Structure formats: structure tokens, C-alpha cells
Amino acid sequence: MRPGLRARLVGALVLTAAATVAVVALALLEPLEGRLRHEDERALRDRIAALTPAFAAAHGDESLRVLAEELHRRSAARVVVLGGRGVLVDTDAGDKRRSGEDLRVSVPLSVGGRPARVVLRRDAGDVAIAVRVVRRALAVAALAGILLAALLGAITARRLLRGLEDLREATGRLASGSAPGELPALRHADEVGDLARDFAAMQERLSRQEQARQRFVSTASHELRTPLASLGVMLELASDELEPGAERPGQARVQVERAREQAGRLGALARDLLDLSVLDAGVDLRDERVDLAAIARGVVAELGPRAQLGGLDLSAPRGASYARGDPSRIAQIVRGLVDNALRFAPEGTAIRIEATNGARPSIAVYDDGPGVPADDAERIFERFQRGSAPGEGGGFGLGLAIGRELARRMGGDLRLQTSPRGARLQLTVPPDSG
């Protein structure tokens, strides 16, 4: 079986510690031995150099032996003086040690005016002892380092994996449909804590989306049930009144007209639901230069006849007001704002559209209707939430919610502005940097 994350983490730390000690040993021991031998050899040469003048002035075997004994005492090495006659002096002729265990230094010099050579040989055991001491110290350090790495690895792995296990359990509960519960790892100021916080944010977002989905399905089914039931009743009545011998055949036209209105409401709801699905799917919107005033004039040209039929004065701004955004979506938002104003504004009043430039270009729609109560100022921007102001025809409470979400997706916003009377809804979009 493949080892778990805990074992792999501890093993990795132990191997790292062992590899570090091995590299240190390879980089230190061999050069250390060579350096110690070199220093010993240099010390022996210095001892010979200190007595070189005395060797040059030596006369006779006795004086040469005295100098060799002095050099032996100073260097703690076997001294051999070689001349033309062979070995002149040997301070330890009985030394049987192997040459591979010795340090050997040979220096030419003059003895009593004749060429000679002084050879010093000394046991290299001190170097070997020093290397063994360092080797043992490294072995102890390696063992201590490996044990410490294993201990720290176990502690770190336990702390790290405890947070990951909490996340795994929470993920399992979330996958099974249960609440994930509290995550202790949220308190960690490390990557595990960041992961836990991201998971908690994701879980919160999923919870909100699930609640929105349930609310959406419930409300949409309710909103669809009413017009569909009305449509069925109206068509049934119209069918009955068109039967031969019906007493009021003229009522069929009225029922068909009402059925047509309900069909129109259903079509509007279908369009709003499609817009919501596009928003929830995260489809990218266009980002291009737009003229807000031109969009406002286009909406007025489209809805102007309806305003005239209702006895309303609908006006649009002149000139140009440039910004960045999706022109079709901006037109959709403005069309929804004007449509709301047409439904709520009293007959004979004015509806005004204003497009402005500046750091935050905007389109504002004014009307002289009943306005929006303070309690509904934010609720009207929620899905399937309608204000309490009276007006002709009830929508489904989606237009302003879709408008705000579209505006924020474009980097702007849609807000209700305070107004002495009526309602003032303002759409802001990013400025045109070009």
C-alpha cells in the first residue's frame, strides 16, 4: 500500500536530514585529513629550518648526533641524517612502524660544509585520531538530527494533517448534504488556514446559491401557476362562449384579449428567467465604447408611442455621453427603468432621462409617480421582490434585480436615489478611458 501523507512527510524530513549530514561528511572529512597532514608536515619543516644553521656549522659525529637529538625532542619525530657515507645519524634505528602510517619530510641541507639530507618521520596517529573524533561527532550529530527531524516532522504532520482531516470530513459532510460544521483550521495563519477559509467561503457561496435556487424554483413555480391558471380559465370561457347558442358571444373577444395579456406576461417571465440563467452561468458581457445619450434616445423612440397613449411626457437627453459597457445590456436596463416609470407615473406627468459624463458616467430615469417607500429601497433589487407602490400591471420582481446584477457585472451599479417626489433610479457604468 502507498504510504500516507504523514509517513511521506516524516520520511522526507528524515531523508533530508540524513542527506545533509552525508554531504557535510563528504565535504569535510577527506579535506580535513589532508589539511591536518599538511599542517603537520609544515610544522616538521619549520623545525628543520630552525636548526639548519646549526647543522651547517656542525663538525664531527657527536655534534651531529646532539643536533639530531635536539630536533627529535622538538619535533617528536624520528630523525635520520643522510650523507655521502649513508646514514650518519638515526635517532631511532629500531622503529618498525609501516611507512603508510607515518608522516615523512625530507629536507636537503649542509652538514659541516658537506651536502646531506635530513629526514623526519612521525606517527600520523594524531591525524587519524582527530579524523575519528570528527567522524564520531558527525555520526552523533546525524543521529540527533535525524531523530529531531522525525520528531518535528511528526509534530508538523500532525498539526498540518489535523486541519486537512477537518477539511476532508467537512467536505464529506457537504457532499452527503449535511452541514460541514465549524472548521478549527480557520484559526491557522498558514496555507491550511487559507484553504479552510476558502472552503468556508465556497461553502457559504454554495449555501447562498442553493437557497437562491430553492427560492427561485418556489417563486417561479408560484408565478407561473397564476398566469397559467388564468390563461386556462380564460380560454375555457372563450371556448364556451363561442359554442353555438351561447348567450353572450361578444364576451369571447374580451376573454381572448385577457388571455393574450397573460401570454404576454408569461413571455416576459420567460425572458427574465433566461436573463437570470445567463447571469448565473457567468457569461461574459461585452466591453466597448458606448454613447449613453444615444442609448437613451433609442429607448425613448421605442417606448414613446406607449407614453403618448398613456398621456405621459417622455424626454431624452441630447448630445453625447461616452462610457464603457455592453450596449445591448445597458439598453435593456434603461428599457426596464423606463418601463417601470411608465407603469407607475400618473397620467399627465413627465418622465425624464438624464445621461451624464464624468468619473462615473450614468443614466438616471425620473418620474413623478408615488415613489418607493424607504423600507423597499433595497428590497426592490432582490429577485422576485416587488415594491408596495400601486401601479398598473404587476411584474414578477425580476427587472430591477437583473438590472443591478448586469450593472455590477459591467463594473457599475444600479441604485435608487433620494428624490423629493416620485422615483429616481440611476445606472452608473465605468468611464471611457480612451
Image (cartoon, rainbow, N blue to C red):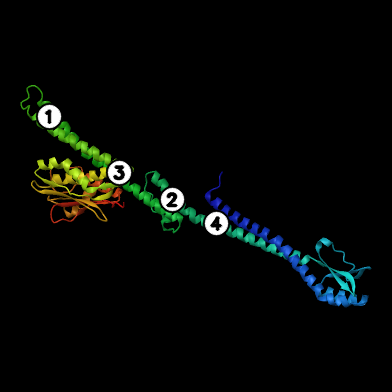
Q: Which residue is mark 2?
A: 167
Q: Are marks 1 and 2 in contact (CB under 8 Å)?
A: no
Q: Are marks 1 and 3 in contact (CB under 8 Å)?
A: no
Picture coordinates of residue 214 (x, y %)?
29, 43
Q: Which-is-in-front pick, marks 1 and 2? A: 1
Give the amino acid type for the residue marked by disc 1 in the picture: Leu
In terms of sequence position, does the residue under pointer 1 or pointer 4 come before the other? 4
In terms of sequence position, does the residue under pointer 1 or pointer 2 come before the other? 2
Q: Residue at x 8, y 21 (%)?
A: 244
Instruction: Decide: is 396 above or below 359.
Output: above
Looking at the image, which is closer to me, 136 or 121? 121
- Label 2: few (<14), some (14–19) or many (≥20) C-alpha neighbours in 10 Å: many
Q: Disc 4 to disc 3, how far (Cα)?
A: 48 Å
| Residue at the outermost top position | 244
Q: Element type at marker 2?
A: helix
Picture coordinates of residue 330 (x, y %)?
25, 46
Q: Disc 1 to disc 4, how far (Cα)?
A: 81 Å
- Label 4: few (<14), some (14–19) or many (≥20) C-alpha neighbours in 10 Å: many
Q: Which mark is residue 153?
A: 4
Q: Element type at marker 1?
A: helix
